[in-house]
Image: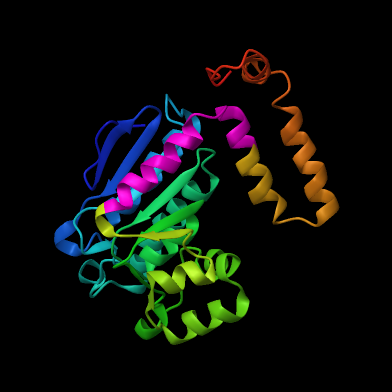
Amino acid sequence: MKDRYETLLLENPRNHVLLVTLNRPDAANAFNTQMTHDLAGLFEGLSLDAQEYRVIILTGSGDRAFCAGGDLKERNGMTDEAWQAQHLIYERMVRAIIACPIPAIGAINGAAYGGGCELAAALDFVYASNNAKFAQTEVTLGIIPGAGGTQTLTRAIGERRAKELILSGKVFSAQEAFEWGLANAVFPQEKLIEEVLGIAESIAANAPIAVRQAKQAIHKGLQMGLSDGLAFEIEAYNRTIPTEDRREGVAAFNEKRKPDFKGR
């Protein structure tokens, strides 16, 4: 993982927590080719080497937009071949985000339209500011969601609601996102990062191997039937038994102290 990216700001605001800010505020943090390369590289790098990080938070710069989707100014006049070649990077990016073993939380601080809504849906869960708005606007441009939206949004809010939103391109509010299952909570904008940091710290304080195995068991299990999901859960569970963290957790419980997990 690189330390610097052209379109991303990286911070370490709490122990074991990586705060990633989409940093194209003049373009409402819309994806250009460079940003998709940066996000793909970041998440692929973290999958290979998590370093000290146990939780990732993703937000947008400014107070207007989380991410306005694909940068249509960059795409204006693109040939079909160039468009498809660029989109391969989007596909790589969303797969890298979904496959990353580290929990990734969204702090949705404004508009999340098109690819921005897909990005939110690709994360493990999101908190939204009360001014956030969401939309899958692709059909209004003659395309469809192509960065996972027909799959991840549908899994979050259900088939019938997803069809309504994707086929109409209508905008929906943070409160509706909460009520329908896309957002886990809604907070005033000035408190959003504080609240997300709070849940991130809670996750980061737990045994990182166990957290990652639990994340994988939930996500992979939903792609399986129940019996296969139960078998996969036991495989994930068994990977936690020989860890130092499992022994530390039990010892700390019996000694009535806070555990000191090392990720081993």
Tell me the quarter of the picture where residue 88 sits.
bottom left
Q: Is residue 168 above or below residue 92?
A: below
Residue at the spot 49% in from the left edge and 57% down from the top edge: 122
Q: Which residues are magenta?
A: 191-213
Which residue extends farthest right?
227
Taking 107 as reference, is 211 above or below it? Answer: above
Task: Please tell me how many numbered marks the rendered image carries.
Answer: 0
Give coordinates of residue 65: x percent, y percent: 25, 63
Residue 46 vs 249, above or below: the answer is below
Residue 32, visible in the rendered structure: no
Residue 82, quarter of picture: bottom left
**Horizontally, is 51 left or right of 66 in the view?**
right
Q: In this view of the protein, which residue sits in the foreground, 126 or 79?
A: 126
Residue nearest the viewer, comparing 12 with 169: 12
Which colour style is shown?
Answer: rainbow
Task: Answer yes or no: is residue 190 visible.
Answer: yes
**Spot occupied by residue 61 in the image (x, y as percentages of width and height):** 22, 53
Which residue is nearer to you in this view: 196 or 52?
196
Looking at the rendered image, the quarter that the N terminus falls into is top left
